[in-house]
Image: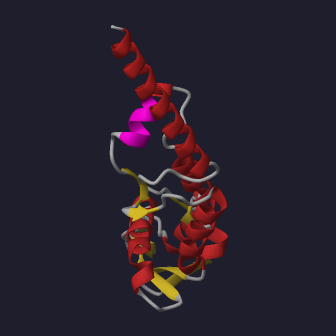
Amino acid sequence: MFVLWGASAIILLILFLYDRWFEGIYEGRTYPNVFMNGLPFGGKTVPEIESYWKSQSVPFQEKTYEFVFEDHIATISGTELGVGYDAQLAATQAYLVGRSRFFLSNLMTKYFFGPVNLPTQFRWDDEALMGILESFAYTVDIPVSDALFDFKNGRVTTFRPSRDGRKLDIQHSKQRFVSALANVPLHPDVSVKILA
């Protein structure tokens, strides 16, 4: 019985020492099983991960986004939109994998679950995007105009033909913007045209 307890204590001590050694190696760094968008980020520091995702955002920020409807064009820069990956969130999430306040969960995440693949969040200033689309709608929208016939003394004195109206579908334009973002890294053009 004593041998069983002694062996168990030695195994637990070895596991504890291994965990301390492992923690020492990865102090201030992500664990080796951390991936983001399928790319390995194990052993990276928070500033390294932030720097990587900020650099991946540059192509989006250097572009000019043009919303086009017939002969109307509205333009906004990627910098004004703040388009890019949320580098701080990505780095924080990657670092916190296996570092919760739950000891057993941390052990499972670090040693048994295998790769943890985190998606990155893409962001833009929605207020700026909505501002440009609402401004663009102001130039594109045409109100419906009913025909006008004004009769006096049996004669038409005022005549205006009816006119169909049109209204920019802001939500659809926003969806087209999101779709266009997926192709930005593939296009060397400085301008990205989005048909509104």
Q: Where 148 falls versus 109 (above or below)? A: below
Total label count?
Answer: 0
Residue at the extreme bottom: 189
The image shows residue 67 at horizontal and vertical percentages of 49, 77
Q: Decide which of 90, 78 is in the foreground and name it.
A: 90
The N terminus lies in quadrant: top left
Q: Quadrant of residue 59?
A: bottom right
**As displayed, is residue 117 above or below residue 19?**
below
Q: In terms of secondary structure, what is the magenta stretch mainly?
A: helix
Instruction: Tell me if I can see residue 145 in this picture.
Output: no
Give me the residue at 51% from left, 87% from top. 191
Q: Nearer the viewer, residue 194 or 53?
A: 53
Residue 193 placement (x, y as % from top left): 45, 83
The C terminus lies in quadrant: bottom left
Q: Position of residue 152 (x, y in %)?
A: 46, 67
Would residue 195 be counted in the magenta stretch?
A: no
Q: Position of residue 169 (x, y in %)?
A: 41, 63
Q: How is the image coloured?
A: secondary structure
- Residue 174 seen from this side: yes
Was residue 107 drawn as part of the magenta stretch in this picture?
Answer: yes
Q: Residue at x 56, y 60 (%)?
A: 44
Q: Image check: 19 left or right of 171?
A: right
| Quadrant hosting residue 40 | bottom left
Q: Magenta span covers which residues? A: 105-111
Q: Is residue 72 left or right of residue 54?
A: left
Residue found 56% across the figure and 49% down from its top: 95
Above/below status of 62 relative to 182: below
Q: Tell which residue pokes out farthest to the front in this image.
A: 3
